[in-house]
Amino acid sequence: MNKQNNTWGEIQSKRRRGIGVASYVNGVLGYSSTSILTAKTIVEAAKSATRIVKVSAEIASIKLPFSKENPVVENHKRTYEIKKHPNDVELDFKTDLVERGMVIAKEEAGKDFSSVEGSYGELYGKKLFVNSEGSEVDWDFLITDLRIKAVCKGVDGLVTGNDGYGGSYGLEAFSNGFSLETLGKNAEMWAKEQLGLKKAPAGDFRCLADEKLVGVIAHESFGHLSEADVIVSRGSPLTDRLGEEIANSFVTIYDEGTPDITKYGGLYLPFDDQGSRTDNTVLVEDGILKGYLNTRGTTTFFDDKRTGNSRALNFTFNPIPRMKNTYLVPGDYSHDETMSELGTGIHAISTSGGQVSSEGQFLFNARRGYYIEKGEIKYPLKEVSLSGNILDLLKYIEGGTKKIKLSSGYFGGCGKGSQYPLPVGMGGPEILFSKVRFGGEVDKKTSDLSMNY
């Protein structure tokens, strides 16, 4: 649902159900799906998948066979309590959340107010996986997301501020975890803050990145670039580099399926779409590349273990290697200590988009930024963009804060091929960099890994 000023846009509710059938022959996949749940149509989908794979097996350039395994049978129960599931809450409660956040933002704006927008989205349901080995697992999924955008008017035109809160939460999170007052006030405060801002300086500066921006860096550096299909096709700078030191010793990166949502936030994903448990996958440990994000087939290719990263946008798509919750682990600093260690530089916060080429060249746009001198904020900045090579960037990490935050959401998501937007989680601690280049752009001819945040 979406509301702009006093006008509600469409309030939509969509329901999707169906079955996808994957047929594997000699390491090649055939896939078909149907939304008509009768025995006849399901059998036809299975036959269609088998016909596809028999044709594909003859011409496939890459084959990823896997051996049979012992079956897994589980009716998974969420490891934390949902007190207000969106399915059990009336529509009026949700529209009230949006309107209350918008009212607060408008009140905070005062004479500078131009417009305000509120959005709420939710995604929930059940997945069931069965295979011919005898496995049968089912689990529930849930995402809620509330966002407020405020627009203020200034001498140089309109400026925008945004804030939001999303993840595998019940609706109680918007009163317990992150208040509407905070959302509304932040959106308006950050909009007004941009009135008369200085542009971010161009060049190399020390940098402190917040948790959301750090999550983007983790997602794009050792997320997309470590997805096993990219590795198998030799399209990643991480190909053939297992065991190498590719970052400094401060850097450890995980991709986890079931983080402690009540403590850290993020996406709760106990199984992937091949019925594999979503282990806590170590991608980088103390600067050493330790692993890739695998499906059942790629585990055989790398002689590695299943990591629970075979995911599909919905039943109409075949599963491919995708991320879960990708994040950098915490360090030893408090926030004040990182500001002091930063000295003079730029504090870059959140993100409005990111892009990384297959060669590892990146461009990330921060939503907000501040110029720091002697550990103190001097003034806010606009047009804060970070660029460079993602593997080089990780060598400049000096440390991180003790606390981490993960986020996910209904709006935006991860894009790969035609499967967009897939909910993922990302985050980490605040990270201190000895050097980051501000300003610049990515060569769009080679840029093929992108995400909207």
Image: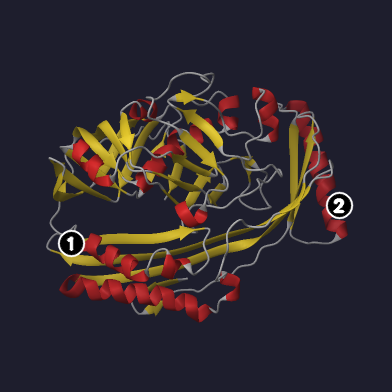
Relative to 216, 305 lies left or right: right
Label 2 crowding class (10 Å Cα cut-off): few <14, some 14-19, many 20+? few
Q: Which residue is mark 2?
A: 43
Q: Is residue 62 visible?
A: no
Residue 75 lies left or right of residue 386; in this view the side is right
Residue 231 image offset from top left, x and y in percent: 56, 26
- Looking at marks 1 and 2 on the same chain, the residue that comes earlier in the sequence is marked by 2
Residue at point 62% right, 43% down?
278
Q: Please, is residue 321 above or below residue 83 in the view?
A: above
Picture coordinates of residue 255 (x, y %)? 52, 39
Q: Which residue is mark 1?
A: 157
Task: Name the kind of residue labelled 1 in the image.
Answer: Gly
| Amino acid type, residue under disc 2 in the picture | Val
Tell me: residue 399, above or below residue 167: above
| In the image: residue 200, left or right of residue 325 | left
As displayed, is residue 73 above or below residue 90? above
Q: Residue at x 53, y 33 (%)?
A: 282
Residue 383 seen from this side: yes
